[in-house]
Image: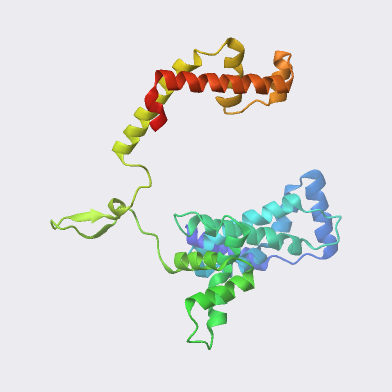
Amino acid sequence: MNLVSADRQMVRAAMAAPYLERGEEHDLALRWRDDQDQVALHKITMAHMRLVISMAAKFKNFGLPMNDLIQEGHVGLLEAAARFDPERDVRFSTYASWWIRASIQDFILRNWSIVRGGTSSAQKALFFNLRRLRARLSQGQDNLTDSALHSKIADALGVHAKDVAIMDARLSGSDTSLNAPVGGTEDGSSADRVEFLESEEPLPDEQVSTMIDEERRNVWLGDALKALNPRELRIINERRLSEDSATLESLGQSLGISKERVRQIENRALEKLKTALERETPEIATL
């Protein structure tokens, strides 16, 4: 049996499965929750597979295989069965609908584009409602600009117009490889798109210059720190040279002095450092 015929058989079996009465559904849910009865789980899921198929059909326009959408919806159905509380006065189909839809939508967001998107609730709402709202709001308004349309959609969904414009651009275009050729260069050779990306990093000579300056400052600071006594050096290290700066109070407690005394020692140590740096490296005043 090939994959296509197996899928068709599964759909036929789902559509032929009997509906469950409220009492029967409750009993099956109890058996699954309390005894992990696999037969009960199978009956519940098969009775609701038509709901999965119906919901998957609503997302068929996103260009993904219908069979995959149904499989992901089934995953959501199983998740709903695992979390369903039969003691609550709600039918399983009502509870499962949210899980089925969420599972299908997550699958679409993961596979619709190689660029990950729709990570927030606002972005998900845009992704799945933008086309429908755009068609409805632009109906009969041929002169409506994109900016005005984006503002209307933003108001309807409670998001920023800028986010609408970004999502609209994503949905209207396709993914492009950075290795795709774009035009030609002056010498007639082709170039890849990645070669036209502008780096935000400093130029190599700037990076080297910065590295040399930092090394020079570290040497200057190391020499100046020799002018401090052990207690001053500890306070400067913990207050000024550590990523997690210690408080005056915590240093005072560990040294057995008041926090005001710690502050005085710190100020005196900073003055000693300044004097040592100016004496040993006069050029530091120009940096």
Q: Position of residue 65 (x, y in %)?
A: 49, 63
Q: Is residue 225 visible?
A: yes
Residue farthest to the top, as pictured: 230
Image position of 76 (left or right of 39): left
Residue farthest to the bottom, as pictured: 140
Vertical placement of 198 versus 143: above or below? above
Residue farthest to the left, as pictured: 187
Q: How many marks?
A: 0
Q: Nearer the viewer, residue 125 or 162?
A: 162
Asked which quadrant contains residue 156, the reply is bottom right
Residue drawn 67% across and 66% down? 51
Q: Position of residue 142 (x, y in %)?
A: 48, 87
Residue drawn 71% across and 16% down? 254
Q: Is residue 1 visible?
A: no
Q: Nearer the viewer, residue 102 or 82?
A: 102
Q: Nearer the viewer, residue 205 or 38?
A: 205
Asked which quadrant contains residue 201, the reply is top left
Q: Position of residue 118 (x, y in %)?
A: 55, 58
- The coloring applied to the image is rainbow
Image position of 118 (left or right of 93): left
Vertical placement of 116 versus 52: above or below? above
Vertical placement of 136 versus 161: above or below? below
Residue drawn 64% across and 63% down? 52
Residue drawn 73% across and 15% down? 257
Q: Position of residue 147 (x, y in %)?
A: 50, 75
Quadrant of image for the C terminus: top left
